[in-house]
Structure formats: C-alpha cells, structure tokens
Image (spheres, rainbow, N blue to C red):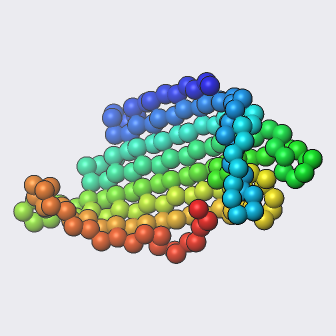
Amino acid sequence: AYEGGFKATLFEGKARLNGSAYYYDYSDYQAFTFTNVSGIITNEDATVKGLELELTATPTDALDMIFGFSFVDANVEDVEVAPGIFRDVKPTFTPKYQLSGLVRYTWPLFSGSELAIQLDANYNSKRWANLRNFDAHSVGSNIVGNARVFWYSPDRKWEASVFVTNISDERTLT
C-alpha cells in the first residue's frame, strides 16, 4: 500500500485544499460474488489506485462551501465469471468517479438568532452490482440532491430545521 497527500491553506485561511493519491496491491482481496440467491467470498488478486481532492472554503462569514472529487481505478484479477472463463473485472459498487458539493448561506436574524439555507448534491458514475460485470449487473450513474433550512437560537442551544432529501426523487440501486 502506498499513499501520499497534501493539505494546503489558501486565500489567507479562507480555503483549504486536501488531496491524496494511493495505490494498493492486494494478494487476498475479499471479492464478493452473488450466485443465485446467495453470495460467495473468494480471495483474489486486485489493484486499486486513485486520487481524492477536497476543497473547503468560507469566502465570507456567511458562506460555507465544500467540494469533493474522487477517481478510482480498481481491478480484480482472473475472476471466474462463468465455468472455465476467467477475466479481470471491476469490484462491486465502486464508481470510477464521484463528485460532491455543499453550499450553505447563513443570515443573522433578530436577537442574535440565525437562519441558514443549505444545498448539497452527490454524483456517482456507473458501477457494478455483481463482481462478474455482466451488462445486467450495471448500475447507471446518478445524482442525488438535498436541501435544508436551519434556524439557530442566539445561544445555539436550540436548532430547528426542515429538509428535503433526494429532491429529484432519483431511484438508485444500493
């Protein structure tokens, strides 16, 4: 396993950029395969490499932002996908790309209380629901967005919120 990364403070402390890159070489990766109505776990050779970036920023006292990106290139080697047929496959539920973002804006109100609005979203690229990687096992990409409104008491001991999870009613396989 090899991993390296960095943390950088930017714009006079108003932003922070974190990043990492990694490479893992497995000799006994636990690979899960659905078979009929159950599953089996086998130990396989695999490699996983990728990178992650995260930017957290507070450009004003009222605005908070967080953005993330990840890239994963993973392969499980020589998996028996059918009797006597072996090939390299992608691990289950491992999207190649993921993006995330959150933006929150806060307004001061009467007597020191505050009102905040937050929007966030997550994107996952195509992934596989079974280690065999047959077309029928493909799970399409998806975006899920959420919204929330907060009220904070002046002493921050009380908070009330209303929210909508999965604004677009996106259906995803988990």
Q: Residue at x 31, y 64 (%)?
A: 117
Q: How many marks?
A: 0
Measuring from the top left, give residue 72's x and y in whole percent.
65, 42
Is residue 83 visible in the rendered image? The answer is yes
Q: Residue furthest bottom?
A: 169
Q: Residue at x 39, y 72 (%)?
A: 164
Q: Residue at x 33, y 35 (%)?
A: 13
Measuring from the top left, give residue 134's x and y in whole percent.
81, 59
Is residue 75 visible in the rendered image? The answer is no
Q: Residue furthest left?
A: 111
Measuring from the top left, give residue 65's x and y in whole percent.
39, 51
Quadrant where the C terminus is found in the figure: bottom right
Q: Give the quadrant of residue 74.
A: top right
Quadrant where the N terminus is found in the figure: top right
Measuring from the top left, give residue 159's x and y in whole percent.
19, 62
Q: Residue at x 58, y 72 (%)?
A: 171
Q: Give the quadrant of residue 77.
A: top right
Residue placed most toward the observer, 64 or 124: 124
Q: Is residue 127 left or right of residue 103?
A: right
Q: Give the quadrant of residue 130.
A: bottom right
Q: Residue furthest right?
A: 84
Asked if residue 30 is positioned above or below residue 99 in the image, the reply reads above
